[in-house]
Image (cartoon, grey):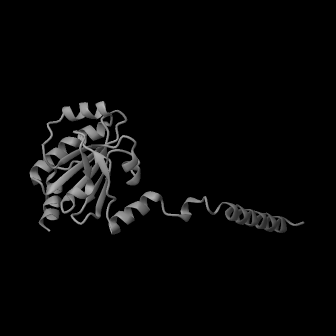
Amino acid sequence: MSVYVKGLLAVVVVIVGLGFYYSMNKDRLTFQTTPKQYSLLDKMEKEGVPDFELPRTDGSKFSLSEVRGKVVIVNFWASWCNPCVQEFPSFIELIKRFNGEVVLVAISTDEVREDMDIFLKAFGLPKTNIHMLWDKDRAIADRYGVGKIPESFLVARDGKLLRKVAGIDNWATPEAIAFFENLTRK
């Protein structure tokens, strides 16, 4: 058998083998489907972010629908997360500046309520327009597809997702202020 025939036979065996492997594993190959997080984001952009109900720090219930009609930042954080701690003062500055037109819904994913309470005592939080909530079992974080914290979801007045911010950001830069001024003018 010549070298060319052996080479051709090897190519045919590899092609048949790859075809068999593909047919047996096509459901598990990652390029076949869109990642779940992307599908969630697409749905939030078209249909709106999911409503939820969680307890506030005072024990009363909060529902996201309570702030419909305002620009809302839904932020997932934890007290042990250093970037979350670094980011929080810029949220406070932004919320104070917009006096009710922009609302922060800060959802703690801490496992222990006391950890969240200690974190909150460290910041002088405004009494209005910041809703501090506790997602004890991460059910809401899971519904939003949160992978790592901090993650923030910027929600328009109509309840639809405008943008997702993964990681730390400075929410009080001149550029951010201008962005939110534009959003609140509409």
* Quadrant where the C terminus is found in the figure: bottom left
Kindly identify the residue that appears in the image at 38 percent across and 65 percent down.
Answer: 43
Q: In front: 43, or 15? A: 43
Left or right of 167: which side holds 20?
A: right
| Residue 75 pos. (x, y %) | 28, 49
Quarter occupied by residue 32? bottom right
Q: How many marks?
A: 0
Left or right of 81: which side holds 131?
A: left
Q: Is residue 24 placed above or below 165 in the rendered structure?
A: below
Q: In front: 24, or 72? A: 72
| Residue 118 pos. (x, y %) | 24, 30
Kindly identify the residue that appears in the image at 35 percent across and 33 percent down.
Answer: 112
Q: Is residue 7 placed above or below 130 in the rendered structure?
A: below
| Residue 106 pos. (x, y %) | 26, 46
* Quadrant where the N terminus is found in the figure: bottom right
Q: Can you name the residue that lies furthest to the right here?
A: 1
| Residue 26 pos. (x, y %) | 63, 63
Kindly identify the residue that appears in the image at 29 percent across and 64 percent down.
Answer: 160
Quarter occupied by residue 110? top left
Quarter occupied by residue 30? bottom right
Left or right of 99: which side holds 131?
A: right
Q: Is residue 30 placed above or below 76 in the rendered structure?
A: below
